[in-house]
Amino acid sequence: MMLPEGIEEMVSGPGRLRFVVQPIVAILLGIRDGRRDAADGRPAYFFSILTGSQPRRDATAEGLAVLARPLAVAILIDMVLQYFIFSSVRIWHAVVVGAVLIALPYVTARGFSNRLRKHRAHRK
């Protein structure tokens, strides 16, 4: 299977540790916020955005506020690494990689931790 141009250099080159560290940070933030959601009696984050059980704009803004710094750092790191590896920067590539490394693990961890905490509270 052919990989898109430059992917191999990004994954195996300098900075490959970010593919572990950045998702871990996002997961920890998601767990913290998911537990907080459950304690406040709110539904799972992504589910609430999809179904509109709380105002979508407020929920999205809250999630972006939490993710702003980690997402900005992920994008900046990707741009710097692109410059060192390729001598050029593709901004959309950096945004997509940042979103995959930060937003996806965050939303997943926030939803799972919310559901798990509610499930445990219900069993007691």
Image (cartoon, helix red, strand yellow):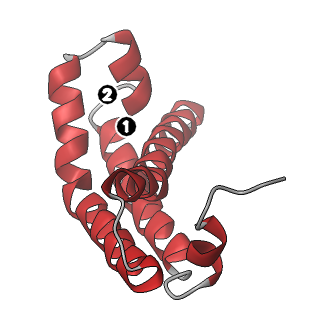
Looking at the picture, does residue 4 appear above or below residue 57? below
Task: Give the labeled residue for mark 1.
Answer: 38
Q: Is residue 44 visible?
A: no
- x and y percent of residue 91 in the render? 31, 57
Residue that appears at 39% across and 16% down: 50
Callout 1, which amino acid?
Ala
Q: Amino acid at mark 2?
A: Arg
Residue at 32% in and 38% down: 37
- Does 101 sit left or right of 123 as displayed? left
Foreground residue among 49 and 53: 49
Density class for disc 1 (Cα within 10 Å; few <14, some 14-19, many ≥20) is many
In three-dimensional space, the C-alpha distance between marks 2 and 1, rounded to whole angstroms, equals: 6 Å
Q: Are marks 2 and 1 in contact (CB under 8 Å)?
A: yes
Q: Is residue 90 above or below residue 52?
A: below
What's the residue at 22%, 44% (across, down)?
64
Q: Secondary structure at mark 2?
A: loop
Assess disc 2: are there few (<14), some (14-19) or many (≥20) residues with their C-alpha within 10 Å of its C-alpha. Answer: some
As drawn, the residue found furthest toward the front would be 87
Q: Residue at x 37, y 59 (%)?
A: 94
* 33 is higher (above) or lower (below) than 40: below
Q: Residue furthest right?
A: 1
> Which of the 4 image quadrants contains residue 47?
top left
**Residue 1 percent coordinates (x, y):** 84, 53
| Spot occupied by residue 80 in the image (x, y as percentages of width and height) | 32, 78
Q: Which quadrant would residue 60 be assigned to in this image? A: top left
Residue 56 in the image, given as x and y percentages of width and height: 23, 19
Where, quadrant-wise, is the C terminus in this rendering?
top right
**Residue 42, numbered circle:** 2
